[in-house]
Amino acid sequence: MLRVWPAAILAVVLLFLRFVLPVWMPEQGARLAVAGSMGGALAIAVWWLFFSKASWAERGGLLALAAAGLYLTSWVAHPSITRGARGMLLYLLAIPFVMLALAVSAVAARRLSDSRRRIAMAAAVAIACASFALIRTGGFTGGFDNDISWRWTPSPEERLLLSPPPPPPTASAAVTAPKVDEEAAEKAAPAAVLPAATKEEEPVAAAAATPNPPEWPAFRGPLRDGSAPGVRIDADWTAHPPKPMWKRPVGPGWSSFAVAGDLLYTQEQRGEEELVSCYRVSTGEPVWTHRDKARFWESNAGAGPRGTPTLDGGRVYSFGGTGLLNVLDAKTGKLLWSRDAAADAGMKTPEWGFASSPLVLSDSVIVGVSGRLAAFQKSTGKTLWMGPEGGGTSYSSPRLVRAASGGGVDQVLLLQKQGLVSVQPSDGKLLWEYKWEGYPIVQPAVLPDGDLIVSVDDSSGIRRIGSGGGPDRWASTGLKPYYNDFVIHKGYAYGFDRSILSCVDLKDGKRRWKGGRYGFGQLLLLPEQDLLLVLSEEGELALVKASPEGYQEVAGKLPAIEGKTWNHPAIAGDVLLVRNAQEMAAFRLGVGK
């Protein structure tokens, strides 16, 4: 007879560690889910090898069957399973499941004859291995919750392609720059100027360009800091909740929005084409699209561009997941010029794709090509300068610091693998650098006195440093943003300490409070009302008080969109725009006093 009571206990423990404990401790959810399930699997393997009382041939035979089954499965499993988590997802998911199948089958078949029990256990292990050839994943959340589906069911992107709404017309062909400027661009980097499109179609009538500055011109708003100055909303969502205006499917991507008048701009993927898309704010109807034959995909987050368009002077500047920099007419989508910025900078596509959002200055557009800054002339696409090499991978976006708050000179900052660099906007010359190695995604924050708040990965916490790259004022682990940008308000930093909101005092880095579970979501600051508008990882909306006195949820959680939501929200006047990799929506917010 097998000794099966340890198997029953270990199976329960494994399930507890994988599914229950991460809910109780969400800030360590992913680590607990992985470590707990793999630890439980190891414990079951130890029980089976040394304490089960099975014959040695049976012990070794079943483990060999499990290993062979996983090896064979790795050859036929869906790419999202075999390539996820840097090639480890199959084993992270399957090993605990297979060991759980071994333990459960041992308990269930304990009263059978030895031969039948062995057949039952072998069948359970084989089926557990083979089951991972039948599924795919749309990626996983910050807490390692996988979006598992049968591999033959269409993904949201495939459903969009199979049953699309009336497609927006393709924007008209590229217009080359004036001859003298084109020749100058070619002399600068002839191989990187992309050919014009050939197919011409008339776009639908676009709204007239607004004479006023765009309400939300770039990634994270007018100042690229996640703040919506001048916006006041009705915060009583019990009496006056956000009013749905429209909702529509959208191609995958982690782009946010830029907004001018009744037009919004975003980036998305449709099959083998990467799109810059324009829709109406009022109705959600498509206005125009620009399409490139390009596709970036990785299994953790899925397909699509990661950057957000920037609006300036009636133009749209976009940077795609494979390194294409496009400049389009904002009214028609007509391509004005395009460059392969990755080739220009000599950078390969990083693991998670190019994720920088363009920074537009008076005469140049600057992108972070992974860990290297690159500047191009706005009018022609001519290469102006390349920043220092050797910074390593970066998923952060460039940040402009004006002389008034940056130590006396204008500068452009970029967080990269080796730390923070500052260059001159005119020529890319290095001004200073701050060494702090990591894997940066978020942007540095600029304080009124010129000091900077920086974070380099999901466990680094934040540091306050001087405007010239030092010295350190303090370091804090009270706020640990990952891909969730934080905001600064009245002497405090507010953001996600992994999956829970946190408030940190900027005088000393001490945490003032921590509370609210919104997953790995995003937030905006409404400074006039001391409010944080939170978009949770599950697509829910909430309002939280931006005050150091304590965590206070003013309103929420209201469902907005479905699916994993990592995209930054945008707000233009009284309209809130939200999206993820499968749908986007607009809500009318009541106007506050």
Image: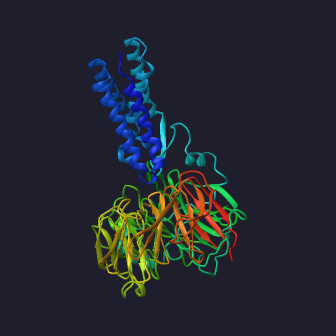
Nearest to the observer: residue 273 or residue 467? 467
Q: Is residue 433 visible?
A: yes
The residue at 57%/47% (across/down) is 156
* Quadrant (top left/top right/bottom left/bottom right) for the C terminus: bottom right
Left or right: where 171 falls relative to 403: right
Q: Which residue lies most toward the right here?
A: 239
Q: At 52% across and 60% down in the image, what residue appears?
A: 567
- In the image, 475 versus 426, the foreground residue is 475
Residue 357: percent from the left, percent from the top?
A: 46, 68
Q: Find residue 447 and report its horizontal and vertical position in percent.
A: 43, 79
* Residue in view at x 38 percent, y 12 percent: 115
**Quadrant of the rendered image containing residue 130:** top left
Q: Is residue 538 rendered to the left or right of residue 586?
A: left
- What count of labels does the image hold? 0
> Is 206 positioned to the left or the right of 51 in the image?
right
Q: Residue at x 48, y 33 (%)?
A: 134
List x then y, in percent, for residue 372. Answer: 34, 69
Q: Nearer the viewer, residue 549 or 336?
A: 549
Q: Position of residue 177 (x, y in %)?
A: 48, 75
Q: Is residue 132 above or below residue 503?
A: above
* Colour scheme in use: rainbow
Q: Quadrant of residue 411?
A: bottom left
Where's the N terminus, which quadrant? top left
Q: Is residue 319 visible?
A: no
Compared with 208, 342 (above or below) is above
* In the foreground, 499 or 166: 499
